[in-house]
Image (tube, coloured by chain):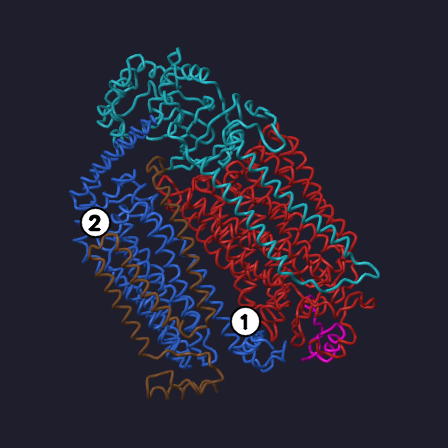
């Protein structure tokens, strides 16, 4: 079945989708330039081929002549001309490339996190989203990380693409010039759901964008949602999974209300008080299996308000 | 006839008209060759091409070595102190000597002195065995210290497990050579009993070589223990600074986990870590960490697999593949030994010795580079 | 010098040598072992031929399944994982089991010594062992195929290949073994061509197919070992966790790409160069005119082989490679395009003032010229950096390399197969059937891959099990084309197979070629030549006339009488 | 017969421990070049000396030059092995060119890969991935 977000957006021209970034016009122009060069050569070669086959075909009463074994003038011509053309294409390509490689000093930076198999975009004010929202006519720089395998971020309408290699920061920049929403693909094979690791690129006017951003960065009303929201943004996610898997610290899944053995031997049940204490001064209580790693968690005292802590507690409670 | 044509033909100076027949072809000349020289040249070119593939094969690992050494110099200087230069040097000497005997064997073959070939190849095999014996000691020692490839790297350098007598790994390494020793000596005994001179010429050198493996082990153990004391404090120094660094980069990792990706923050962390580790480093007189001050690389926390393990990965890959080549070398040398014992070589047919020789020298050639690159980093 | 061995004189030579009852290499000994343990390069070549054609059938079926799956945008008969395993195996089987050994190991093994005028390759045992290595490697791949299924893509990119489930180790071992098979073949040819040339066979009297094979062998010997160590390290990565390519241990995934492409780009030339050699032969023989600019073609083969080593980086333009490296690699990439262009023009002008006979091999050669030109030219879009940012890892790339690899190598291979079939098997095939197969293959091929260029530039990423609706129509064209193509190939297979049973006996020289293989019987005797062949210009057709009684070309009577051709 | 021949050849050069002398009268198989014993020994001891040298050199503090120093010594040793033990001095020019040519390809491989590795050095974030 087709994923809901695989929308059809018709190509703008025979070869290309619409031109939605500053790179597009250059790339398309250059593409067509090379295309015409190729067509000229191709037509010459095929026409010559057909003509020779017909003109010199084997037939009664026709005797070919074994001369014409080489012709320096000719051979030099068809060595030099292609060389010159190749040089031009190369140089022109480098110009365009350096353009794509060198972002202006003033850019709006968005952090991209690619995981198998979804995109997460994080904006300077901490807002997170799964679709990429960018303001129009403003240079945007993507600072991209991958946590598992190599991915590659490709926005056809922007004509730009960069691999996201784990263990590295990968930078890509563009400037959108057309409002609307465009496909965003993963183009480096990354496993089962590679082909549905897609998102939308939403280009909005500055006002709309700001409005959206404000909305996106506002915490939800419902405490559980709010807890999840905090869980994703305050770094809990880095060490504590919510699916039972072990990352660094213990998973939150179904942990509430269970009794756990502490490093000092006593048994404690995980309740609101325990959670609050682990958030504010984690070192005071470590489960026996995690005593070694307890130093890796630092206190959130002063970083989280009481109602935020209770929201987190509600969230953890909700993870049956 | 043009000049090129002439030198094309000169290989085939005679015997071209009996295309397709084997009469007047001696046993050692394959049917599709016209004369001994053509056969020799073909073999020689073939073996050179094979050596070329070997060089490129190793170049992959040298490339990995160069890359990661230049990316993490501090890891390299830190880790290589756990390699024992003396053992490395001894092994280098042994291999060089084996190269000498090998070259000598080739000379003997060219002069048709088959007994000489037997003696020389025998010595070469013996040297190979010594080399492997020493390697066995080195490997078992590293394994005991938990100095393993990145994924399994859990160093107990501060307090290595003190096992009585031999390391169990060393014992595992000694099983197969032990079996060989028994079988070969028995075989030699039989040869003596039946007064089968060819078999004696083969079994003798081989059983001595098997013995030499244990000679190598003994040598290795002796030198290893000699080093132990000095090695010990090295380890402690290493461990102690590694501890401080643990904290340093723990703050970092937690900073990582509390991922609020503003760069500024990350970088400040990185910077401070750099600072801390350079202090610890200078405190212990370890120059390595100072590299980390500039680019954002954090100085290695040697207790974490994702630091020093990489060095040992590459160490095991390079020396391991090299050791496999030594084993293969022993195999082909034995083949030559057998042919020589049967007295098959003479001044028109010595190719096999020459080819095996070239291969053996290449193995030596590789080690000549491995030794300084792995053992002698300061 | 003694007379050239013509069919007639071979016969007489036969009777004089009663101790060899039947000189024909196919029948001079019988029984399974006489094949399984043969050291005869011709039999080994034939066994390779059977082997690689079988794996081509396998790879082709996988390809048709892929295209069928892609007929509609969503999931059809295969899950995402199923699709990923399919394209992985299609790629791996086609590249490692079929294309790389296709021309050198199958046709090359058969032809190199015969064309050279030698009795055999320099190392017959090595030759046989390389065939068995090929079998062993294939076995490993079949394990990968029938066990849980390999889903890394044929490129084994880390860290995916270190994290995924599935028989990656088995597959890499397969690649390792196949690599050695390929190395041994190349090594054998280099030595053979260097040391086994008979009197008079100078470098510039070698048929261009030998030049191409020689260049190919150089690449095989120089590049393949690096693949060997790469896959070995990858296996160690999985088994011993050495972490050289794994960022979790400070390893670097891009390093793997460097290692991998240092082999795999030259490998592209391992695939295409011998094909170019075949085309040089076909163009000349079937235009009954000496090749145009012999030396240019010969040198361009060597040039391509050497330049081929400098351009691997163009597979990594978007993979975060440093800018300076990227630009250098782009520049070097364009240098390779020139020798290829030269070859194309030379082939074209070989027909000029020749006598072109449109027999099946020539039809395939012309198809090659057409398709390879497209393949080569579309390379320009990918070599230039700014357009590549957009086109990289899209269907444009897929179409490009299928035009080069399949439109180039496969078509040339088929042309060569039809060209030398009479020599290998000793039977003529049905000419019309052959020509029809060429036509159908040509049409089907373009229908399959032209739409993919458009898809690519419109942004369709490769290796997608499901795709957006807007690409549906183009995908459907492509799928239809694929099945037409498949049909064409089945026609070709039918034509060749039926010739085994009802083909008329092939004359020694059905096409009027003048390279040495046409101077011995078809099929050739066990020792290829009963007396040392007289070597002259391989493309001098002036002395050959068509003889209706033989049904093929023979020496002009007066030349045969006079004996010498100087 | 070649056997006996070789033996008297051997006697001949026992008198002067010098193979080249015994060389001339074997025109019909000129492809054997036995190296004289003194040469083999000389090369061997040179190699040993260089090994000692490189070990000593590693005790000095040469900073960044250290790696180059040890590589230079290693290369000299390698050259000795190739020239004399692998008798490249007697070998066909083609083989020599081929082998040295190979080193060019190795250089290309290492060169490009290292150049790349260095230029993206500052994009690498250690420890950003946790081992699976």
Say left or right for C51 vs B184.
Answer: right
**Chain identifier, blue in the render:** B
> Looking at this view, is C431 or A204 the one in front?
A204
User: From where the camera sits, is residue C253 visible?
Assistant: no
Secondary structure found at label 2:
loop
Whether B139 is drawn above or below C83: the answer is below
Crowd band around label 2 with a 10 angstrom C-alpha radius: few (<14), some (14–19), many (20+): few
Left or right: residue B301 versus residue B40 is: left
Letter of the red chain: C
In the rendered image, is residue C268 in sight? yes
Which circle, 2 or 1, is nearer the viewer?
1
In x, y percent, where is residue B282? 17, 43
Q: Where is residue C103 in the image (x, y as percent from the top left)?
A: 61, 57
Subunit ID for the residue under disc 1: C
Q: Return the residue at label 1.
A: C195
Residue C10 is one of the magenta-drawn residues: yes
Q: Characterize the magenta stretch by its predominant secondary structure.
A: loop
Colour seen for chain D: brown
Instruction: Looking at the picture, tell me which residue is in the foreground, C194 or B237.
Output: C194
Q: Which chain does tag 2 point to?
A: B
Q: What is the display colour for chain A? A: cyan
Q: Up-down: is C529 above or below A157?
A: below
Q: Name the residue under label 2.
A: B162
Does A106 sit left or right of C119 as displayed? left
Locate residue D62: give its quadrant: bottom left
Coordinates of residue C365 in the picture (x, y in percent): 69, 54
Q: Is residue A246 magenta?
A: no
Coordinates of residue B90 in the picture (x, y in percent): 26, 63
The stretch in magenta equals C1-27
Q: How many marks?
A: 2
């Amino acid at each position: 079945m087709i994923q809901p977000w695989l929308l059809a957006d018709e190509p703008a021209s025979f070869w290309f989708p619409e031109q939605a970034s500053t790179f597009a016009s250059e790339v398309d122009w250059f593409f067509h330039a090379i295309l015409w060069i190729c067509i000229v050569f191709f037509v010459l070669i095929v026409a010559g081929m057909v003509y020779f086959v017909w003109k010199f075909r084997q037939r009664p009463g026709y005797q070919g002549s074994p001369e014409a074994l080489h012709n320096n003038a000719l051979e030099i011509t068809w060595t030099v001309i292609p060389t010159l053309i190749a040089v031009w294409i190369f140089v022109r390509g480098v110009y365009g490339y350096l353009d794509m490689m060198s972002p202006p000093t003033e850019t709006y930076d968005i952090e991209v996190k690619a995981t198998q198999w979804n995109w997460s975009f994080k904006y300077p004010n901490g807002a997170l989203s799964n679709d990429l929202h960018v303001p129009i006519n403003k240079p945007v720089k993507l600072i991209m990380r991958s946590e598992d395998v190599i991915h590659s971020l490709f926005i056809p309408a922007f004509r730009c693409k960069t691999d996201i290699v784990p263990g590295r920061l990968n930078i890509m920049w563009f400037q959108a010039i057309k409002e609307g929403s465009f496909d965003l693909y993963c183009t480096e094979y990354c496993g089962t759901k590679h082909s549905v690791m897609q998102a939308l690129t939403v280009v909005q006017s500055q006002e709309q964008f700001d409005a959206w951003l404000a909305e996106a960065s506002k915490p939800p009303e419902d405490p559980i949602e709010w807890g999840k929201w905090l869980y994703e943004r305050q770094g809990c996610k880095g060490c504590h999974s919510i699916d039972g898997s072990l990352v660094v610290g213990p998973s939150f899944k179904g942990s509430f209300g269970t009794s756990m053995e502490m490093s000092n031997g006593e048994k404690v049940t995980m309740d609101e008080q325990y959670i609050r204490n682990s958030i504010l001064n984690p070192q005071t209580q470590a489960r026996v299996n995690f005593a070694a790693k307890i130093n890796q968690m630092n206190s959130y005292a002063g970083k989280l308000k009481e109602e935020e802590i209770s929201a987190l507690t509600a969230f953890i409670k909700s993870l049956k | 006839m043009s000049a090129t044509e002439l030198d094309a033909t000169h290989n085939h100076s005679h015997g071209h008209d009996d295309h397709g027949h084997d009469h007047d072809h001696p046993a050692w000349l394959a049917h599709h060759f016209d004369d001994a020289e053509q056969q020799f040249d073909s073999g020689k070119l073939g073996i050179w091409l094979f050596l070329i593939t070997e060089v490129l094969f190793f170049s992959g690992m040298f490339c990995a070595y160069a890359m990661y050494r230049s990316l993490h110099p501090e890891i390299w200087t830190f880790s290589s102190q756990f390699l024992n230069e003396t053992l490395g040097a001894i092994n280098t000497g042994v291999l060089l000597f084996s190269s000498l005997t090998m070259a000598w064997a080739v000379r003997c073959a060219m002069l048709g002195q088959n007994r000489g070939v037997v003696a020389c190849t025998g010595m070469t095999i013996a040297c190979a065995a010594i080399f492997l014996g020493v390697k066995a000691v080195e490997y078992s020692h590293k394994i005991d210290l938990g100095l393993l490839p990145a994924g399994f790297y859990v160093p107990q350098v501060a307090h290595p497990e003190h096992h009585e007598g031999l390391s169990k790994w060393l014992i595992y390494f000694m099983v197969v050579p032990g079996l060989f020793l028994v079988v070969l000596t028995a075989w030699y005994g039989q040869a003596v009993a039946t007064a089968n001179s060819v078999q004696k010429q083969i079994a003798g050198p081989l059983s001595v070589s098997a013995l030499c493996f244990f000679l190598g082990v003994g040598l290795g153990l002796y030198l290893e223990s000699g080093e132990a004391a000095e090695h010990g404090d090295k380890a402690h120094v290493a461990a102690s600074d590694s501890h401080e660094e643990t904290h340093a980069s723990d703050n970092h990792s937690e900073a990582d986990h509390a991922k609020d990706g503003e760069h500024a923050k990350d970088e400040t962390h990185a910077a401070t870590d750099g600072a801390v580790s350079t202090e610890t480093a200078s405190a212990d007189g370890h120059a390595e960490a100072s590299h980390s001050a500039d680019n954002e690389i954090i100085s290695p926390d040697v207790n974490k697999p994702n630091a020093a393990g990489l060095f040992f990965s590459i160490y095991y890959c390079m020396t391991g593949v090299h050791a496999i080549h030594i084993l293969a070398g022993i195999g082909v040398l034995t083949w030559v030994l057998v042919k020589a014992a049967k007295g098959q070589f003479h001044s028109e047919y010595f190719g096999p010795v020459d080819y095996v020789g070239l291969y053996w020298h290449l193995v030596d050639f590789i080690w000549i580079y491995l030794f300084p690159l792995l053992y002698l980093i300061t | 010098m003694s007379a050239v061995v013509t069919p007639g004189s071979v016969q007489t030579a036969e009777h004089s040598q009663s101790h060899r009852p039947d000189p024909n290499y196919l029948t001079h000994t019988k029984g399974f072992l006489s094949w399984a343990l043969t050291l005869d390069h011709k039999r080994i070549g034939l066994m390779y031929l059977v082997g690689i054609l079988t794996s081509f059938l396998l790879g082709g079926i996988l390809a048709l399944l892929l295209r069928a799956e892609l007929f509609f945008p969503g999931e059809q008969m295969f899950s995402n994982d199923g699709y990923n395993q399919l394209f992985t195996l299609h790629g791996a089987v086609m590249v490692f089991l079929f294309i790389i050994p296709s021309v050198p190991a199958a046709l090359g093994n058969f032809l190199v010594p015969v064309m050279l005028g030698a009795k055999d390759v320099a190392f017959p045992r090595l030759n046989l062992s390389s065939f068995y290595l090929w079998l062993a490697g294939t076995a490993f791949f079949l394990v990968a195929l029938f066990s849980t299924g390999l889903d890394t893509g044929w490129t084994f990119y880390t860290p995916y290949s270190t994290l995924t489930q599935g028989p990656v180790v088995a597959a890499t071992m397969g690649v390792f073994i196949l690599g050695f098979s390929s190395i041994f073949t190349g090594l054998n040819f280099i030595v053979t061509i260097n040391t086994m040339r008979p009197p008079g066979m100078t470098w510039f009297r070698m048929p261009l197919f030998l030049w191409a094979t020689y260049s190919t062998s150089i690449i095989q010997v120089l590049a393949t070992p690096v693949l060997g160590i790469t896959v070995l390290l990858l296996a160690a990565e999985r088994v011993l966790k050495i972490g050289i390519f794994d960022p979790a241990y400070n390893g670097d995934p891009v390093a793997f790409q460097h290692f991998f492409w240092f082999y795999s780009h030259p490998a592209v030339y391992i695939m295409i160069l011998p094909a170019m050699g075949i085309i040089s032969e076909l163009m000349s023989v079937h235009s009954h005119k000496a090749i145009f600019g012999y030396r240019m073609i010969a040198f361009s083969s060597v040039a391509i082989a050497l330049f081929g080593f400098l351009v691997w980086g163009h597979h990594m333009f978007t993979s975060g490679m440093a800018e300076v490296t990227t630009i250098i690699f782009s520049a070097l990439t364009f240098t390779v395009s020139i020798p290829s262009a030269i070859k194309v023009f030379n082939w074209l002008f070989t027909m000029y003032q020749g006598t072109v006979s449109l027999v099946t091999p020539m039809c395939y050669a012309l198809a090659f010229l057409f398709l390879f030109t497209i393949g080569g030219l579309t390379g320009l879009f990918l070599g230039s950096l700014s357009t590549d940012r957009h086109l990289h890892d899209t269907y444009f790339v897929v179409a490009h390399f299928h035009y080069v690899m399949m439109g180039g190598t496969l078509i040339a291979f088929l042309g060569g197969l039809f060209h030398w079939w009479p020599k290998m098997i000793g039977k003529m095939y049905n000419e019309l059937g052959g020509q029809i197969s060429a036509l159908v293959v040509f049409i089907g091929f373009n229908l399959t891959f032209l739409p993919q260029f458009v898809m690519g530039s419109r942004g369709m990423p490769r290796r997608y099990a499901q795709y957006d609706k807007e690409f549906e129509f183009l995908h459907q064209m492509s799928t239809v084309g694929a099945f037409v193509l498949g049909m064409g190939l089945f026609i070709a297979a039918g034509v060749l197979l039926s010739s085994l049973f009802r083909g008329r006996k092939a004359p020694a020289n059905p096409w009027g070629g003048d390279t040495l293989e046409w101077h011995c019987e078809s099929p050739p005797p066990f020792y290829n030549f009963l007396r040392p062949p007289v070597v002259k210009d391989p493309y001098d057709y002036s002395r050959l006339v068509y003889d209706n009684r033989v049904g093929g070309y023979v020496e002009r009577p007066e030349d045969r009488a006079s004996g010498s051709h100087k | 017969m070649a056997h006996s021949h070789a033996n008297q050849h051997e006697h001949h050069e026992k008198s002067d421990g010098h193979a080249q002398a015994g060389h001339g009268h074997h025109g019909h198989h000129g492809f054997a070049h036995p190296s004289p014993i003194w040469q083999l020994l000389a090369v061997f001891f040179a190699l040993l000396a260089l090994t000692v040298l490189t070990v000593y050199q590693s005790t000095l503090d040469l900073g960044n030059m250290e790696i180059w120093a040890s590589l230079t010594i290693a290369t000299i040793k390698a050259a000795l092995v190739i020239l004399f033990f692998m008798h490249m001095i007697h070998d066909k020019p083609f083989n020599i060119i081929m082998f040295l040519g190979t080193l060019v390809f190795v250089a290309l491989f290492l060169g490009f890969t290292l150049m790349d590795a260095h230029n993206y050095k500052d994009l690498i974030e250690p420890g950003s991935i946790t081992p699976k």
